[in-house]
Each structure stands twice: as structure tokens, then as C-alpha cells.
Image (cartoon, grey):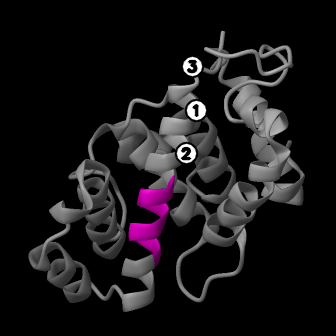
Amino acid sequence: MAHIDLGVDETQVPGISGPMRYRPETAAPLNALAEALLRAPHPTLTQGERELIAAYVSGLNDCNFCCNSHSAFAAAWLPEGMELVRQVRGDLATAPIGEKLRALLHIAAAVQVSGRKVTSELIDAAKAEGATDLEIHDTVLIAAAFCMFNRYVDGLGTYAPTDLSRYDEVARRIVEVGYGNVV
């Protein structure tokens, strides 16, 4: 259970949802950020690709709740579903994705370690695969935001369900109504 009393039954309101109910005044801008980064229309990155970046970074951060959540969300948006998500998270080098997305995920992985780990070489490699400045910007921001979200969830010691079907239920709601109506 969480390190503080969130005033909810965490088995029913797991992960980030508990702290968001505890502090709704901070939940609104955090949900708006997630909506803008992951679900809002984007000229080139699909919702599935953006959710995959979030899941990948969350996995690197060992944040079980966010990794499982955003893996389910990515799978809901991606035609290849959870199998592709597992392949990317398991071995980025051999995952069956485009080279541009792979290069963006390398940038996201660098951000996860430190923003200063994003090198000119990583940026040049992404651009060589066709990544635009907007895609690079949004990848860095998604990765940075998920470092924050992961630390928020794990720093408060929130409950993460082990039953993966729980994440699929939330994924359906995210696809239907977005992040603004999750809490």
C-alpha cells in the first residue's frame, strides 16, 4: 500500500489514480499533459507509437504500474497489439518496427538516464531515418514526462495490480474517453 493515506481503496484505485484523487488540483494538469502528449492528434506519430514510448521508458524505470498501463494502451492502438509491445520492450534491436521509431526509442532511452545523454549522434541518427524536429521534441517530452509520472507513482509506493487484465480494462476507457476522465 502507498506510503501515505490516499483516502481510497488502492486495490480499486491503483497506481497513479490514487494520488490523482488525493490531489485533484494537480491531477487536472497532469491528465491534460498526458492527453496532449499521448492521445491528441499528431501530424506523424500515432497514438500507439506515443504510448509505446511511454511504456518503453516506464519499463526502463522499472515502474510496473505505468509500464503495464501504457503497454496495454499502446497495444490497444497498435494493429500488431501486445506482441509488438513485448518485442520492443524485450529487445529493441530486433523488434519489427521502423528504423525511425527505433531511433526515437533510443532517444527516449537516453532521456530516461539523463537529458544530457541525448547526443548529437542520437539526434542525427533519428533525422537520418526521417524523424522530424517535432517528433524528436515530442519523444524527449514524453520520455521526460514519464520519468516524472513513474517517480510519482513509485515514490508514493502505490499499488500495481499483477492481473494484467486490469490494465486492459483501463486501456478501453483511455481509447474511448481519454485521460481527462480517468480519475
The circle drawn on residue 157 is 3
Residue 71, placed above or below residue 101: above
Question: Can you give x and y, in whole percent of width and height, for residue 55 in the image?
Answer: 49, 46
Q: Nearer the viewer, residue 39 or 164?
A: 39
Which residue carries the number 2 mark?
149
Main secondary structure found in the magenta portion = helix
Disc 1, disc 2: CB below 8 Å?
Answer: yes
Q: Amino acid at mark 1?
A: Val
Neighbour class for label 2 at 10 Å: few (<14), some, many (≥20)?
A: some
Mark 1–mark 3 Cα distance, whole angstroms, equals 6 Å
Q: How many marks?
A: 3
| Quadrant of the rendering where the N terminus is positioned | top right
Q: Amino acid at mark 2?
A: Phe
**What range of the chain is rendered magenta?**
138-145
Question: Can you give x and y, in whole percent of width and height, for residue 74 in the image?
Answer: 60, 52
Res. 135 image quadrant: bottom left
Disc 2, disc 3: CB below 8 Å?
Answer: no
Residue 25, placed above or below residue 86: below
Residue 121, placed above or below residue 93: below
Mark 1–mark 2 Cα distance, whole angstroms, equals 6 Å
